[in-house]
Amino acid sequence: MAKEVNSREDNYSQWYNDLVVKANLAENSAVRGCMVIKPYGYAIWEKMKAELDRRFKETGHENAYFPLLIPKSFLCKEAEHVKGFAKECAVVTHYRLKVDENDQVVVDPDAKLEEELVIRPTSETIIWNTYRNWIKSYRDLPLLCNQWANVVRWEMRTRLFLRTAEFLWQEGHTAHATSAEAVAEARRMIHVYADFARNIMAMPVVIGLKSEKERFAGALDTYCIEAMMQDGRALQAGTSHFLGQNFAKAFDVKFANREGGLDYVWATSWGVSTRLMGALVMAHGDDNGLVLPPKLAPIHVVMVPIFKTDEEHDSVISVMNDIKDKLLRSGLSVKIDDRDNLRSGFKFAEWELKGVPVRVAIGPRDLKNGTAEVFRRDTMTKESLPVDGLVDHVVALMDEIQKNIYEKALAFRNKNIHIVNTWDEFKEKIEEGGFLLCHWDGTTETEEKIQAETKATIRCIPLDSFVMEEEGKCVYSGRPSKRRVIFARAY
């Protein structure tokens, strides 16, 4: 049988680490804190990327590419921005190596850069320096760009996909003539992310606004989508930022407006990363392995032949090839696992581990009866079905599985949302996990005290789900509050 993973109940953290590695999604690399994304994991990321890229282009954005290296002086032009990322920046100081008298490779001390270069933790500064050359008039606006890239943030405690020193992502950077247009863009893109999370990842999310403490460095407002993992912790799955004119002023990006005057442009930035891979594992996986929504599964259907003799093998494979061809024409990806050195039970466990939505097994008895065994990964159930009509059934099953995975995650989230009114109740419920809907007095001081005492943070001020605007008292300070916010422990 395929290697088992630890139980979620026994050790959720170890379960996650085991599953990422044993399902062949990723592994640690020789560089501390960095990961190798393996072909099966990268195939999932490619499907995510394709779905998101299509949505970006449908909303008028174009892809571009900007440099990996950023002059340190650029990063220092926006005070809040550099303050937010200073501790995570990797810095390039030299441009050459040499072999010394002991045949050791060393940094050439004579090759020091005049100005240090920072490996991008995010690209606002290099992009806005470039936009200064692109934007001259209101006719150049809006400027809607996205880039698919890698970034480096020197994390001290890392975990595959969730927090690594280098990760893959996309970052959109847009410029607008008015504040209202930029705010509308930031809001539009967080809804694009929410639609992707709900309808492609089958992951229910809450759209919300970050508190001032949790905002992106240099932003006036940060919108987010927050998801609940199966251990009750929150995971920030995407963010969209209204940057105001901060970066335009820092890099002197002005445009001639319709009235003939000069004005600074208004900006947004927004992004999601390979952290979504971690969310996919933690939101849907079980003790048997991954559970992949069909819209992200690299393989929709795996077919396992059951046979003892060469003649049985050839007969089964002939029928399977016919089914495979029909499934491919229906738009599904199919693999026939015809490895002759593995038992069928091992194959079953391996494909369950990898989260393939549907498994079809056919043996000599099935051939005689004109049937096939169809197994659903989401429910771990199987049934015997006639081969005639099998293709239509499996195609329809994909939508059913996608919907069921979402509804299961939604039911779990809703079961673990608690309205909390007292500090004693807060301390009790936060240990159980989940989202706590609480009144908050709006101060960073209270937010920091709650985090220090419980490790819980404000995940968001809800905008589309669990919106509770009502008079009340802060759960911690007792001061007046006009709305509830979501507190949770988070990744």
Image (tube, rainbow, N blue to C red):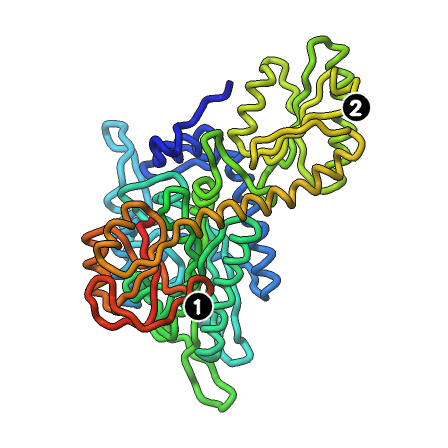
Instruction: Tell which of 251 and 463 is nearer to you.
Output: 463
Counting the numbered discs, the total is 2
Check disc 2 and report the residue beneath it: 370
Give the amino acid at mark 2: Gly
Whether residue 478 is visible: yes
**Residue at image point 54% right, 25% down:** 350
Q: Residues within 10 Å of mark 1 (few under 14, many from 20)?
A: many
Up-down: is 242 above or below 456? below
Q: Residues within 10 Å of mark 2 (few under 14, many from 20)?
A: some
Residue 211 as seen in the image, left or right of residue 281: left
Give the amino acid at mark 1: Thr
Check disc 1 and report the residue beneath it: 268
How far apart are labels 2 and 1 at the CA level? Answer: 59 Å
Instruction: Tell which of 311 and 53 is nearer to you.
Output: 311
**Residue 403: image location, x then y, percent:** 59, 47
Residue 11 as seen in the image, left or right of residue 282: left
Furthest residue to the top? Answer: 309
Residue 377, picture quadrant: top right
Numbered disc in front, either 2 or 1: 2
**Residue 145: image location, x then y, percent:** 51, 63
The answer to the question of whether label 2 and label 1 lie on touching residues, with beta carbons closer than 8 A, is no
Residue 259 as seen in the image, left or right of residue 333: left
**Residue 200: image location, x then y, percent:** 57, 50
